[in-house]
Amino acid sequence: MDSIIMSYITVTYLSKSDMTVAEQEWQKIIQKMAPKFKSAGALRQTVSQVFNKEGVFILANMWEYKDEKAFVKCQALFREAEDEFNKNVGIVQKIFPTRGIILHDVHFND
């Protein structure tokens, strides 16, 4: 099934160690919650480290959802995950979310 809604969230950290610890903790939480996200309609999560900006520590998270209802359901799960993250670690992060409807999805390896 192709996704039609996506979110792209960048998160900036104060240091490389903060970024590393935050990424590991977030993935531990997301993996534990994976069945809930799947049931809600999340299709894919991709995490990348931004490397073209020297001296900054940024992770980019792309999520894909099967439809708008799935996106809305997943927002409640994100709040749950964020609450657990904040309980477990005290890392300062600046979060910049962007949401969109996928207009083109070109696969070059097919």
Image (cartoon, rainbow, N blue to C red):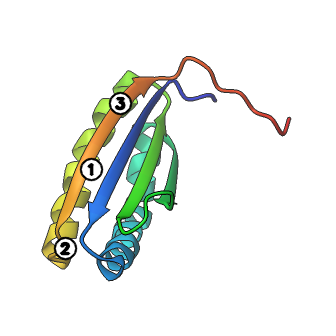
Q: Residue at x 21, y 62 (%)?
A: 93
Looking at the image, residue 76 lies above or below residue 29: above
Q: Residue at x 34, y 72 (%)?
A: 19
Q: Residue at x 36, y 77 (%)?
A: 16
Q: Amino acid at mark 2?
A: Ile
Q: Which residue is mark 2?
A: 91
Q: Amino acid at mark 3?
A: Arg
Query: On the rendered structure, is 41 left or right of 2?
Result: left
**Disc 2 and disc 3: Cα gap in Å?**
24 Å
Element assignment for label 3 = strand
- How many labels, in total? 3
Looking at the image, residue 31 lies above or below residue 24: above
Q: Earlier in the sequence, mark 2 or mark 3?
A: 2
Q: Residue 22: x, y in percent?
A: 32, 72
Classify mark 2: residues with Cα within 10 Å, few (<14), some (14-19) or many (20+).
some
**Can you tell which mark lies on residue 95?**
none
